Amino acid sequence: MAWWLLILAGLMEIVMAGALKSAQGWTRPVPGVVGIVAALVSIFLLTHAIRDLPTGTAYAVWTGIGAIGVAALGIFAYGDSPSPARLGCMALILLGIVGLRWLEA
């Protein structure tokens, strides 16, 4: 169950970043509020996940999910470059997340 909470927490990080991007420097307050709520939910879920997982592992996975997700969001929604170097770095982060999960099992 802790791993599912951690995955959901990471997904909320992606929602937060997308919402804050849409807030356009707080000129659009509704997406800004959505971003703050998503951040609070993400932290809430993370705190529950680390009750049963090592803190370092959970934090690394949480930030990794957020990093990959936000980078992918940038590529698909905002036209960021899907360069081979960027995709390779994202793959390395994913490999680290998978490795931490396998080591935890």
Image (cartoon, rainbow, N blue to C red):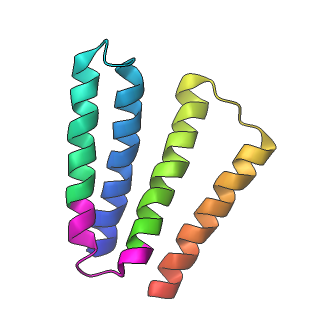
Region of the chain picked out in magenta, as a range: 45-57
Q: Could you say which quadrant of the image residue 84 lies in?
A: top right
Residue 72, image x, y percentages: 56, 40
What residue appears at the point 27 percent right and 52 percent down from the top-left corner? 42
In the rendered image of this protein, does residue 89 appear above or below residue 23?
below
Relative to residue 89, is residue 105 drawn left or right? left
Query: Residue 58's spot in the image, x, y percent?
Result: 39, 71
Q: Main secondary structure of the magenta part?
A: helix
Q: Is residue 50 left or right of residue 65?
A: left
Q: Please name the residue shown 24% across and 37% down the image.
A: 36
- As drawn, is 75 to the left or to the right of 40? right
Residue situated furthest right in the rendering: 84
The stretch drawn in magenta includes residue 30? no
For the point 68% across and 62% down, which residue is it?
A: 92
**Is 89 on the left or on the right of 102, as rendered?**
right
Q: Is residue 48 magenta?
A: yes
Please identify the residue farthest to the front as the structure is shown.
Answer: 25
15 w.r.t. 4: above or below: above
Q: Where, quadrant-wise, is the C terminus in this rendering? A: bottom left
Which percent across, then down, holds residue 86? 72, 45
The residue drawn where x is 27% and y is 26% is 32
